[in-house]
Amino acid sequence: MSNPFLIGDNMTGGYGKGPPILHGCTISVNKGEIAVIVGPNGAGKSTGMKALFGMLNMHEGHVLLDGEDISALSPQDRVQRGMGFVPQTSNIFTSMTVEENLEMGAFIRKDDISDTMAQVYELFPILKEKRNQAAGELSGGQRQQVAVGRALMTQPKVLMLDEPTAGVSPIVMDELFDRILGIAATGIPILMVEQNARQALEIADKGYVLVQGRNAHTGTGKELLANPEVRQSFLGG
Ligand SMILES: Nc1ncnc2c1ncn2[C@@H]1O[C@H](COP(=O)(O)OP(=O)(O)O)[C@@H](O)[C@H]1O
Ligand SMILES: [Mg+2]
């Protein structure tokens, strides 16, 4: 078996001088795969994502990207190494246009970004149509497309999405999942947190159920969907 492309191994840590939120939590994603993190509110899903991205005070554990220990790197350095992260909140600049958001996303690049922008517009045609509109005027689903598109502008080697379908209708959720599958099909491994646990596990190669900062269940998406305990406690039966 090959090593995971991105792994947060045995992560223990919290915010500032506060108590640990994560307790020996392990999360990883392999090349060519979609990994999904589910679990109750406050379980530490977003905290786990932030730990992988270098935004947490880690007491224990390591983050490895493509086999290299990046635990000491700043978030910006992790972006340079190929990590793309769409946080759960404040993930777009609402007063800027769609296109300005995409340009901002490419801030670390010094080369020509026009091809990447064309690819993002191909993936999200509505963004091309609305490219000169303020991002804050868009619908929830469209804003999430801006946020994902912005992260893609750095040409990431791995994409982390925290609740990309939060607050959107079921139809828009399906559309967003289709787009996410499309991104994965281009070879970018995806690690995402999802409230829509059942639907997310259906498209997941690997799933994690986190509870109180710990790994409660880990398996393939199929295994978790079939696990009676997971169904009962986290999938509504
Ligand atoms: N910036 C922060 N500072 C201090 N505690 C936080 C912060 N963000 C989240 N927490 C705490 O960490 C725990 C896990 O939160 P979070 O990772 O956001 O959960 P989830 O994403 O699973 O809903 C919660 O108890 C929350 O109150
Ligand atoms: Mg969260």
Image (tube, grey):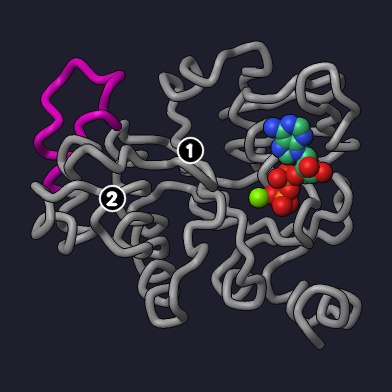
**Relative to 209, 228 lies left or right:** right
What's under tag 2, amino acid-wise?
Answer: Gly
The magenta-colored residue range is: 102-118
Give coordinates of residue 143: x percent, y percent: 33, 55
Mark 2 vs mark 1, foreground winner is: 2
Task: Tell me if residue 208 is in the magenta stretch.
Answer: no
Looking at the image, which is closer to me, 222 or 60?
A: 60
Pointer 2 local density, CA inside 10 Å: few below 14, some 14–19, many at least 20: some
Looking at the image, which is closer to me, 91 or 153?
A: 91
Q: Where is mark 1, residue-wise?
A: 85
Instruction: State how far apart marks 2 and 1 are (Cα).
Output: 20 Å
Residue sitting at x 36%, y 48%:
148
Residue sitting at x 48%, y 64%:
165
Residue 184 shows in the view? yes
Give coordinates of residue 211: x percent, y percent: 86, 55
**Relative to 119, 199 lies left or right:** right
Depicted 173 relative to depicted 65: above or below: below
Position of the C terminus by quadrant: bottom right
Residue sitting at x 44%, y 70%:
168
Q: Secondary structure at mark 1?
A: strand
Depicted 88 relative to depicted 79: above or below: below
Residue sitting at x 36%, y 41%:
92
Q: Where is mark 2, residue-wise?
A: 136
**Relative to 57, 163 lies left or right:** left
